[in-house]
Amino acid sequence: MKFHKKSIGQWSGAIVAASAIIQPACAEVFAYHADHVLGTSLDMQIEARSKAGADLAWQAARAEIDRLERIFSTWRDDSEISRLNQTGQASVSDELVELLKRCEYWRAQTGGALDCRFGNVIAAWSNAAEQGSVNLKHIAELAALSRSAEIHADDSVAEVTVGATLNVDALAKGVIIDAAVTAARAASTEAQAVLIDIGGDMRLDGMFTSGGVRVGVAGPGAADNETPAEIMLLNNAAIASSGTGGRDVIIGGRTHSHIISPLTGQPQEAVETVTVIAPDAEAADGLATAFAVMGVAASLGYANSHEGIEALIITRGGSRFVSNGWSQLSAPVEKVTAEVAGVANPWPENWSVDIAYEIPKINAGDYEYPYVVAWVTDADNKPVRHLLMLGDSPRWLEENYVHWRRVGRKNPALVDHVARPTRPPGRYDIVWDGRDDQGRPVEQGEYVLHIEASREHGGHQYEKTALTLTDKPVAVVTEAGSELGKVSIAFGKSDKGS
């Protein structure tokens, strides 16, 4: 099931910042993680009086997510919604009836900018990317049929008229997150506060005794490990993002947004990213998609006239627009200066090391996404900065045995600090902003960039590149290997620098 729709760097639009949560003796925060959940990863934090109580909440949330996936997933042939798409009419669960009613509610709320009827149109654009050409007349015909189609859902029976295929991805993940939160709280009276994050869509329920959860919002085109452009302090709220990224389609050499406007049947091309804060995940998820289609004025008008809705919109031209209450939720981002850190010779202002790496496509029946680690040491091989760890489960660490032997086993806490889910084949970016693992600026001088990749049932590759980082630009390209494609390294002034 692939409900994930955003790719705004691996901050995925929203990621829990590692704010040290200081709890009283009666409560503790327990963290949980699982891969391959709704086509992405699941992270959960539960504040409870005991691990046993937190475990009950975690198990209930997982069970509810799995149950609803079997109903809502268009990626499963055996799901209820897939059977409905195949037959046009079917006996369905109360949950699917309610979801389809919510689809119609949000269609009315957004003036048609969110419409669950457009599965055929979305599929047509995906097929066009595979074929390398697009039949705009055919897509226009599909869009017209989809707009005129009717959805009837009541008394455990659902019907979709001819011409439409249901695609509920813009709403279903939020609905599932809300249901999982409810299940977790119901299963454990000890669960005082719950946070669920599925692929960057997040819901916080209850008041964490830390006083709030710091959530990072990435800027457009952010690198995998880049520091968030903005930090929001949230409690009892949900946040979701949508925008351009890895799911966009390329047709004839031109990149098109994967977000299709139901109003036109065409990819939306005006908005780069949208982030929405709302009282629940359903609203945040749905509006993040709808606002990408509605345009800035209509989106901000909606947010400003509905309590609890805040929005950040960045256009393709780089202009930034926010709703009236957005700044009230923003937390200051403090950075240690070179003077405070006692660094006499820091990097030039706004310089960074930008690294573009490739995960090649490998034809293998048992192919697994690779575990990738990138880190920086000084000339004496002392760790300076951990840039990237792709693979969240501790079991994978020893697969990258160079990193594990030299660094990882000595610093197990780093796994929770910088680990990210594994990535499919493609081209990705990471950035070193000239700071060490403690956030302090580093000196100019000699450094070594290490990149290591390994796969279960596959090979292993380790590369290291010596870098002299002063006040002069550096550009290096390493050759492709068995597990990594070419790696491009550039040191110089960059808008990704700090």
Image: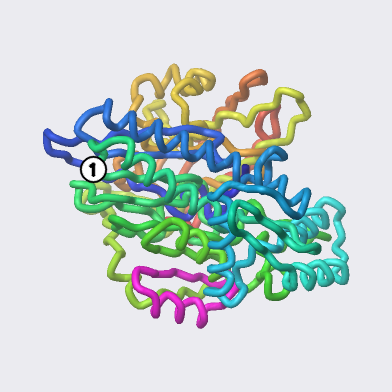
Q: Position of residue 55 (x, y in %)?
A: 33, 29
- Which image quarter is the C terminus in? bottom left
382 is higher (above) or lower (below) than 88: above
- Asked whether 152 or 219 is in front, the reply is 152
User: At 69% from the left edge and 29% from the top edge, which residue is drawn?
Assistant: 481
Identify which residue is drawn at 70% across, 34% down: 480
SS at badge 1: loop
Q: Residue at x 39, y 75 (%)?
A: 306
Instruction: Assign the N terminus to one quadrant of the image.
Output: top right
In terms of depth relative to the viewer, which is nearer, 339 or 130?
130
| Placement of 197 over or under 412, stated as above or below | below
Left or right, 479 with reference to 236: right
Q: Mark 1 points at which residue?
A: 192
Q: Quadrant of residue 239?
A: bottom left
The residue type indicated by label 1 comes to Gln
Q: Is residue 397 above or below residue 497?
A: above
Q: Please, is residue 243 above or below residue 470 in the view?
A: below
Which region is colored magenta?
292-316
User: Is any atom of residue 476 visible in this view?
Assistant: no
Q: Does the magenta stretch include residue 42?
A: no
Residue 139, horizontal then vertical, whole percent: 82, 67
Residue 294 drawn in magenta: yes
Residue at figure coordinates x 53%, y 38% from the top left: 67
